[in-house]
Image (tube, rainbow, N blue to C red):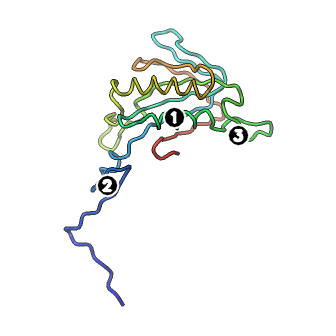
Amino acid sequence: MGETPRRGKSEIRSWLINGTRVTQPSEIEIAVNFMRVVIQRVSEANVTIAGGVKAKIAAGLVVLAAFEASDTIEDLEWMSGKIVRLRIFDDESGVMNRSVQEVSGEILLVSQFTLFAGTRRGNRPSYSRSAPPDVAVPLYEKFINRLASDFGKPIQTGEFGAHMVVSLSNDGPVTIIIDSKQRE
């Protein structure tokens, strides 16, 4: 019988994550960069800024979006297509089989950097994974344009960096989280 190989202390274990070689399990979280959205099917929603309604929709989707510095146009394009084609509205049989386009719904997009909150250490979240405003604002603006283009009509939005009050009636409830790099 052969012997089971043993690892010596000098052996370094590593992983290749999205093209980045990491040697410590704690580095894996840092190496995985992606755009993240939370999608909620709603019967109505609105965004209020400084006491005034900035945007309002009837039935459709509220999309909360966060960006990382490494996000690409391909990430935005893939995510936009996924959102407008996601079949989470009921058909005539009561089965979630229709997209927001097919039900003539609306979309409200809100930037939310807190989706990348890191809570590994302590009780105060870290937002270091979120793209800084000089990177995130152009990504957000490109995402608005791409989403409106794929959707075939204008979408409603919040205001990047503003303190917003988002009110919604979650229909179902249906809430879906999608990450662009994992394509899920």
Q: Secondary structure at mark 3?
A: strand
Which picture quadrant has residue 181? top left
Compared with 145, 179 (above or below) is below
Q: Nearer the viewer, residue 71 or 116?
A: 71
* Residue at the extreme right of the image, as rendered: 92
Is residue 3 positioned above or below 29 on the image?
below
Query: Amino acid under label 2?
Result: Pro
Res 50 → quadrant: top left
Residue at image mark 3: 96
The residue sitting at the left extreme is: 10
Q: Which mark is residue 25?
A: 2
Q: Which mark is residue 77?
A: 1
- Marks 1 and 3, the one that precedes in the sequence: 1
Secondary structure state at the residue bearing disc 1? helix
Real-space Cα separation, disc 1 to disc 3, in angstroms: 24 Å
Q: Indicate the position of residue 92 as horizontal and vertical percent values.
A: 80, 36
Mark 3 to mark 2 CA distance (whole Å) = 38 Å
Q: Position of residue 62 (x, y in %)?
A: 57, 27
Distance Cα–Cα, label 1 vs label 2: 31 Å
